[in-house]
Image: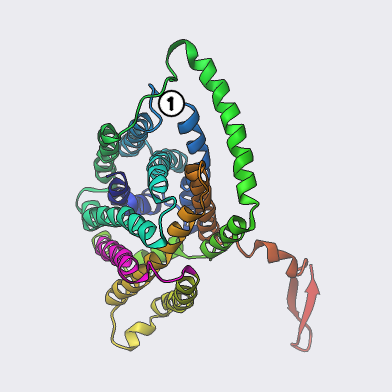
Amino acid sequence: MVYFVQGVLGLSRLAVSFYLKDDLHLDPAETAVVTGVSALPWLIKPLYGFISVSVPLFGYRRRSYLVLSGMLGALSWSLMASLVDDKYGAAFCILLGSLSVAFSDVVVDSMVVERARGESQSTSGSLQSLCWGSSAFGGIVSAYFSGSLVDAYGVRFVFGITALLPLITSAVAVLVKEKPTSRSTGGHNLSLVGAGFFESSKQNIIQLLGAIRQPNIFLPSLFIFLWQATPHSESAMFYFTTNKLGFTPEFLGRVKLVTSVASLLGVGLYNGFLKNVPLRNIFLVTTIIGSALGMTQVILVTGLNRQFGISDEWFAVGDSLIITVLGQASFMPVLVLAARLCPAGMEATLFATLMSISNGGSVIGGLSLLPLPLLGLLPKDIPDTKPDENGDVEMKSN
């Protein structure tokens, strides 16, 4: 149910994009920064693991934090629906909403990883398929309405509806089977909990650093980061398709519906045919094919598809379908790999760290920061071009 809610929360994604573009009049670069900031909570997921383990609320390490996460998400989207009217407020509220989802994600991830530890690649793959299939199904439920509701009632209405969804996470928290701990944050033992938190966190960090230094964990982690850090043009393409191609919110909602179905198909493809295939083979094939298919955006931008009699709308739908199926099928092995790398005793912490590394790569890809280390290859001076008296161009350095 928690993974399902994560998928359903996609209801607000188009509303946020149109709110930033049309209501706040942000350009693509500013939009990329705002969305990048909203991803920050996903980069520090190990911290949530430390907190939930070391500081039980009201005697529970999981139930109470799921309740708190749901309430925080409801608050953030309620503020978006009523009070927020500038980019800083929007960034803050989106950040809070992202924090609520990330924290609940760590809690349920820890439960999944505990079940997956020691299991075969096939069993672990089936478990991850169930989780991500639930998220994809949630995306299907909300996908079409994400655009049509924006068209019919506006972004504020969509934010208000979205505010109700995190409360599902709070409600289902009572279903978590968990024995109460002897410590809680109530009353006189709050200071003891705080001291225990710092001591436990210190030990966890030492243990975590020791685990990451191991080549069998460090090298796959590096691969995951670089694999996710490939630059993408999500924000720029949104502005291009809405401003230049005239795609409406309703149509983009239909595209989102297609991609949500495609995600579910990708999970099914992996679970049905690929979960027993060696991970290296999957990464090799999907990376090569994905790199080729990723260039299809150039066809849409240049309008080459229309020369073959394919409308922009149909090309966008087909392109999204194929790329999403492949992307989801190729991401599933990342989850399985991360779950299987986790040693006993620190499953939740290390899995959260590996997912934070993956998310960090994705953020860098969204902001296109990968070329920054290569700036030293550029010349320090920018030459001016100035025609001489004979009409020839001479270079003059500033």
Occupied quadrant, residue 63: top left
> Which image quarter holds the C terminus?
bottom right
Question: Which residue was labeled with disc 1?
Answer: 56
Looking at the image, is 42 positioned above or below residue 66? below
Q: Where residue 120 sits in the image (x, y, percent)?
A: 41, 59
Occupied quadrant, residue 93: top left
Q: Where residue 145 sits in the image (x, y, percent)?
A: 21, 54
Q: Indicate the secondary structure of the residue bearing disc 1.
A: loop
Looking at the image, is 209 positioned above or below residue 225? above
Closer to the camera, 361 or 394? 361
Q: Residues within 10 Å of mark 1 (few under 14, many from 20)?
A: many
Residue 118 belongs to the span the image colors magenta: no
Closer to the camera, 396 or 191? 191
Residue 264 belongs to the span the image colors magenta: yes
Which residue is pictured at 43% across the width and 40% down the height?
A: 99
Q: Residues in magenta? A: 253-279
Occupied quadrant, residue 243: bottom left
> Which image quarter holds the N terminus?
top left
Looking at the image, is 183 positioned above or below residue 125? above
Q: Is residue 1 left or right of residue 197?
A: left
Closer to the camera, 98 or 52? 52
Q: Where residue 34 sits in the image (x, y, percent)?
A: 47, 48
